[in-house]
Image (cartoon, coloured by chain):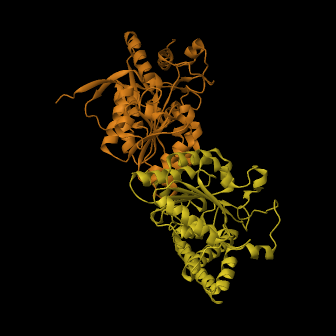
Amino acid sequence: MGDSAGTLDGDAGLGLLRAMWRIRVFEERVGALTRANEVHGLVHLSVGQEGVAAGVCGQLRPDDAVYSGHRAHGHALAKGAPPGPVLAELMGRDGGLCRGLGGSMHLVDREHGLLGATGVVGGNVPLALGSALARRLLGGDQVAVVFFGDGAVQGGIFVETVNLATLWRLPVILVCENNGFAEFTPRSAHTNVERVSDVVAPYGLERETVDGNDVVAVRDTFARFLAAARAGGGPALLECLTHRLRGHYEGDPQQYRDALAAEEWQELDPILRLQRRGAAEGWLDEDVPARLEGEARDEVEAAERFARESPFPPASVTSEFVYAE
Amino acid sequence: MTETMTQTTYLQAITSTLAAAMRADPRVLVIGEDVAEGGPWGTTAGLAEEFGPERVRNTPISEAAICGIAIGAAQSGLRPVVEIMFVDFVTLALDQLVNQGAKAHFMSGGQLTVPLVLRTQGGAGQRGGAQHSQSLEAWLTHVPGLKVAMPSTAADAAGLLAAAIADPNPVVVVENKTLYFRRGQVPDGLGATPLGRASVVRAGRDVTVVALSRLVGEALVAAEELAPEGIEVEVIDPRTLVPLDLETIVASVARTHRLVVAHEAVQHGGFGAEIAAQVQAAAFDELDAPVERVGAPFAPIPFSPPLEDAYLPGREEVTAAVHATLGRAA
């Protein structure tokens, strides 16, 4: 696959690379901590899909809303959630983003505009639309973004939401991470419609399918949709074709698919692709990738220290947050 | 100072409360199917004319999306009042209500709030058949994070709705279609009726009847009919099921020593079972007889008029239950 023709200056390129390294290293560490039974529950990693989170979230403001699904760690980090509280949440600690009441699939960081991840596939797509409605009625120029997988598109709530988003012309951007698998089943076994962007075609939605492992393509297409939404335009759908390098969840034996050969993955890897591009365009010095990876490792180590030092929550939190006062 | 009252229907009480809330707070909006036209009974009639289509939003027949949009809007600063035309259709929105809405405050460790009102109506008696007549409130009471109100009078239809709109949590208000055109006194300037405070609608010394929604009226008629027999029935309307004012119910049982719980919903797994369980746990020694339950049979609601009439619990069933707690034959 070729890289997008979009132009990239060095600072922007380094920013995207840094964002992807932060997610990659964080996710790999979460995988290890899951195997060590320190991160608990069902854990879905986004290794291989970092280009989407980085390409989209890097352009958003803290007051723009982001909703995500069960594979949300990367979106949370890219939206600005601090890694310590994110990891503490995955470890069920009191210092977690949600005081240990949410867990991996239900991350929320209101301060940074992460308004919620859901473990129910597609379940919060309409919430993003509602958030966009609120932002418009309250007079702001904020937008709402929702990340979901291609598996969410076969549910009725998706079409209900697209219909209303277009009818009401609200500033919501639907970002589909199409990794070709809905849990354990290839897309071809779930639907005859190959492209998610074709599913929404009759609604007159701004839509585009991009190579989701080309972070520049993601960034540039999203930038166009974002500018339109910010200026009062209607909804858009960005379909990012990507690859989930790991299983559906940590521990998934993945008997339903063949492992990608290492050389094939090197071609696809959004990080390596941007690094090759940076080297070719002359904005990436040879020693920078190792430095960015090292910085990301330092950050994750600090996050892990924070999480380990945080106690498990007191039993009282279970009754404290059932109702708001 | 005497309170001045206005005679109004249950339906008009709802409409005026919505209008007053929308006038008082620009964040309040109404979303639902046909709401701009007033809906099948006219509960939202006139609101679109006063507040415009941005705040009185007609939707397609997409209950799940309507509910999800309202939850998202509530999380981002609005105070939506959703109308789901029949409680039977809440089934279509349950993921939204139960998974996305009710738990958001909890799962976010208190970061998110969902000040959402879901208005809907239930109840049989209009030959609507089994998909337009149900009483499904017990399902909703089983979900931590939701509050559930069931007004039985015009004043409570107004007061509980005002409280629901002001509440920072998702509140489901289950109205009753057979009560919409019933008239009642509503105090002028009535504000919010606190959620979680029962109403003792008739005082009596012999048997406590806790009744929900339409059954409150039925219980009052039963009480009138029992009075000449020398049986004084106390009728309590809990008004909200979550939170439940157990204290008022237990205080009554401590005087009467007999309890009947009455609702139109299927008796099996109905909310009456929860009330019975809570009362026996709190006041077992006060009870002189087993708690009697009044509810519908364990069957879908039949369509044919004589069958529906026979199916629906009403004053006769309440009377029989009162007799049973007193050890008398009906």
Residue A154 visible, this orientation? yes
Q: Nearer the viewer, residue A153 or B103?
A: A153
Looking at the image, is A192 positioned above or below residue A302?
A: above
Quarter placement of the N terminus of chain A: bottom right
Q: Nearer the viewer, residue A134 or B133?
A: A134
Residue B176 location, x and y as percent?
46, 27
What residue is shown at x 46% (from left), y 66% (from top)?
Answer: A62
Q: Position of residue A183 (x, y in %)?
A: 72, 56
Residue at the image point whose x is 61% and y is 14% from the top: B304
Q: Quadrant of residue A303?
A: bottom right
Tell me the residue at 40%/10% (across/down): B229
Rendered view: A295 above or below A191: below
Residue A143, compared with residue A16, is above or below; it is above
Residue B33, position as x, y percentages in the image: 50, 35
Q: Colour of chain A?
A: yellow
**Residue at the farthest left position:** B1
